[in-house]
C-alpha cells in the first residue's frame, strides 16, 4: 500500500487505498489524519476498497492557505472520490468527518451510495439552550488551546464529548502524540473548530439527496451533545438513528466492533436487514 497525492484547488491531498470491493471512504474526526482510521480500514479491507486520507492542512496534505470550511473539505472529498470511482461510494465519517460527509451528500449527492454519519456536530438541530451550550463547549476548547496549548485543549475536548481512552479493545495501543499530531491539533483548534461553530448544513438539500443517509451515535455517549445532534438529525430526516458500539471516538478505540457494525449497516449483514424490518419505523428506505 502506497500513499499518493491528489492536487485539488488550493491543496494536495495525501491518500491511501487498500482492499477490494465497493469503495468505502473513511473520514476521520477531530485532528485525525489517515492513521486515525488505519485500524478500522484494515478490518474492512477484506470487504471494501477502503480509501483513507489526510484532510487539507493535516499531516501529508498541504494547503496553499490556512483554514477551510466543511464545504471546502466536502469538495476536496468529492474530487478525491472522483479520482477513484465513477460509481456512488459508501462514506463513513465521525464527528467533523461526519459533518463533511453530510456536506458531501448535500452538495454532490450522486457520489454517495450510503453515508454513515456518526455523531456529526450539526448544532443547528439542537434546541436553542442546548445549541448555546454546545457552542460554548467548542469555544472553551479553542480558549484552552489559546491559553495553554494543544494538550489541555484536547483533554478539554475529550471531556466535553465523552471520549474515554480506557474504553478500548485489548489490541488497541494508545500512542503519545508526536509533533505531527500536535500540529494537526493546532490546525483543528485554530481553523476547523471555529468553522464548525458557524457552519449551517443545508437540510433541504440533504433531505432531497438520493443517497441513503444513516445517522449514527455511540451506545456509551448518550449524555453528550454530539449524540443528541445525531438523534435530532435523524428525526428531522424522518429516519432512524443507528446505535454504534462505544462512544464518540469508537472508530479509533474500538475498530473491530465498529467495522462489524458498519458492515451490518452498509447492508452486508442479514442481521441488520432483519433488525431494520422488525423495528417500528425502521430505517427510511432511499
Image: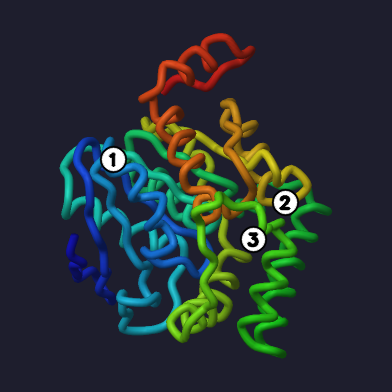
Q: Eyeballing the image, is 17 above or below 90?
A: below
Image coordinates for residue 160, horizontal then vertical, percent: 74, 62
Quadrant location of the N terminus in the rendered image: bottom left
Q: Position of residue 96 (x, y in %)?
A: 52, 58
Callout 3 secondary element? loop
Q: What numbered label is drawn on residue 79? A: none
What number is the disc on residue 89? 1
Q: Residue at x 38, y 51 (%)?
A: 26
Q: Is residue 282 visible?
A: yes
Disc 2 packing (10 Å; few <14; some 14–19; many ≥20): many
Single out the residue that lies furthest toward the top. Answer: 278
Q: Nearer the viewer, mark 2 or mark 3?
A: 3
Q: Is residue 58 left or right of residue 94?
A: left
Name the residue carrying label 2: 225
Residue that mark 3 sits on = 165
Element at label 1: strand
| Residue lying at 71% horizontally and 90% vertically, measured from the top left | 147
In the orientation shown, which residue stands out farthest toward the right?
Answer: 129
**Relative image position of residue 81 (x, y in whole percent):** 24, 51
Q: Is residue 6 visible?
A: no
Q: Nearer the viewer, residue 60 or 37?
A: 37
Amino acid at each position: 500500500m502506497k500513499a499518493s497525492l491528489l492536487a485539488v484547488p488550493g491543496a494536495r491531498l495525501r491518500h491511501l487505498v487498500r482492499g477490494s470491493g465497493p469503495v468505502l471512504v473513511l473520514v476521520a474526526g477531530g485532528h485525525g489524519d489517515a492513521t486515525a482510521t488505519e485500524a478500522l480500514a484494515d478490518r474492512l479491507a477484506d470487504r471494501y476498497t477502503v480509501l483513507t486520507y489526510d484532510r487539507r492542512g493535516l499531516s501529508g496534505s498541504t494547503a496553499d492557505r490556512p483554514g477551510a470550511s466543511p464545504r471546502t473539505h466536502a469538495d476536496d472529498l468529492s474530487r478525491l472520490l472522483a479520482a477513484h470511482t465513477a460509481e456512488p461510494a459508501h462514506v463513513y465519517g465521525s464527528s467533523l468527518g461526519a459533518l463533511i460527509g453530510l456536506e458531501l451528500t448535500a452538495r454532490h449527492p450522486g457520489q454517495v451510495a450510503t453515508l454513515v454519519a456518526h455523531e456529526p456536530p450539526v448544532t443547528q438541530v439542537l434546541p436553542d439552550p442546548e445549541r448555546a451550550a454546545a457552542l460554548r463547549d467548542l469555544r472553551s476548547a479553542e480558549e484552552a488551546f489559546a491559553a495553554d496549548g494543544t494538550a489541555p485543549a484536547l483533554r478539554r475536548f475529550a471531556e466535553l464529548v465523552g471520549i474515554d481512552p480506557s474504553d478500548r479493545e485489548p489490541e488497541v495501543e494508545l500512542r503519545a502524540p508526536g509533533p505531527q499530531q500536535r500540529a494537526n491539533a493546532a490546525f483543528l483548534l485554530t481553523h476547523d473548530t471555529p468553522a464548525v461553530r458557524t457552519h449551517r448544513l443545508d437540510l433541504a438539500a440533504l433531505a432531497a439527496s438520493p443517497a441513503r443517509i444513516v445517522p449514527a451515535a455511540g451506545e456509551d455517549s448518550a449524555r453528550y451533545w454530539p449524540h443528541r445532534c445525531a438523534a435530532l438529525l435523524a428525526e428531522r430526516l424522518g429516519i432512524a438513528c443507528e446505535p454504534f458500539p462505544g462512544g464518540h471516538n469508537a472508530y479509533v478505540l474500538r475498530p473491530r466492533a465498529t467495522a462489524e457494525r458498519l458492515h451490518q449497516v452498509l447492508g452486508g449483514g442479514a442481521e441488520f436487514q432483519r433488525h431494520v424490518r422488525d423495528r417500528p419505523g425502521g430505517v427510511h428506505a432511499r
